[in-house]
Every structure is written in structure tokens, then in C-alpha cells.
């Protein structure tokens, strides 16, 4: 993914296959149409939460993805609680 000044997309849920599992061996809960839309527009960053199971960051050729989850599936704070840092786009 190349660095750019593209926009940031914020949605409730994740795109299909990107940080969309509640457990490592669980099923995917993301939206396939959302993934297509993000990839077509080549967003600079996509921030989402909704399903719990861990915060984190991931990148592909079109965007940087940030799952800004604060609670786990039991509604307990994650460790480190809500401390996702994005240094640059």
C-alpha cells in the first residue's frame, strides 16, 4: 500500500476477512460488499469495531484497517484497553 492523503472511512462493522473474527478459529463476520467498496475507492484508512475479540491493525494494497475494539466478547476491557495507535496514514 502506498502512502497517500486519501480519506478515512469509519464504519460500525468490519469488511469481510479483515480483523472480522471473534476468535482465531471462528467464522468471518465481516461484510463482503463493504470490502469491495473499500478496495474500489482505495481508502487511506478504514476504522471499525462492532464485533469484539481483539483490537488490531492490518494493511493490504488499498487501505490500512484499524479494528478499534475496546471490549472482548465478555464485555471486559481488552489488554491493553483501547490503545490502538495509528502513527501515519
Image: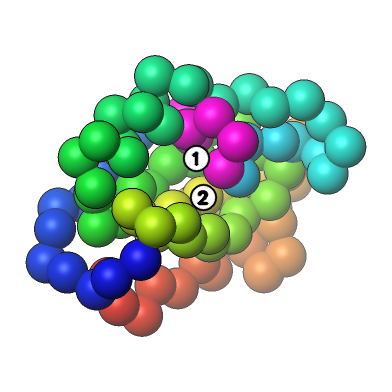
- Which segment did they paint magenta? 12-18
Query: In the image, is residue 25 above or below residue 62?
Result: above
Place of residue 52 in the rendered image (x, y in percent of width and height, measured from the top left): 66, 38
Q: Quadrant of residue 80?
A: bottom right
- Disc 2 vs disc 1: Cβ atoms closer than 8 Å? yes
According to the picture, the residue beneath numbered tag 2 turns out to be 67
Q: Position of residue 24 (x, y in %)?
A: 83, 44
Q: Which residue is mark 1?
A: 49
For the point 32% across and 40% down, the residue is 39
Query: Depth check: 1 or 13 in front?
Result: 1
Q: Position of residue 74 (x, y in %)?
A: 79, 35
Which quarter shows the C terminus? bottom left
Of 59 and 19, the residue lying toward us: 59
For residue 70: magenta?
no
User: Is the N terminus in the top left, top right, bottom left or bottom right quadrant?
Assistant: bottom left
Q: Is residue 8 visible?
A: yes
Residue at the (49%, 21%) spot, across then down = 31
Amino acid at each position: 500500500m502506498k502512502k497517500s492523503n486519501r480519506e478515512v472511512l469509519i464504519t460500525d462493522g468490519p469488511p469481510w476477512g479483515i480483523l472480522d473474527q471473534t476468535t482465531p478459529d471462528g467464522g468471518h463476520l465481516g461484510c463482503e460488499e463493504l470490502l469491495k467498496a473499500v478496495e474500489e475507492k482505495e481508502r487511506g484508512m478504514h476504522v471499525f469495531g462492532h464485533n469484539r475479540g481483539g483490537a488490531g491493525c492490518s494493511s493490504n494494497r488499498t487501505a490500512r484497517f484499524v479494528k478499534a475494539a475496546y471490549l472482548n466478547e465478555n464485555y471486559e476491557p481488552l489488554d491493553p484497553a483501547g490503545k490502538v495507535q495509528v502513527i501515519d496514514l
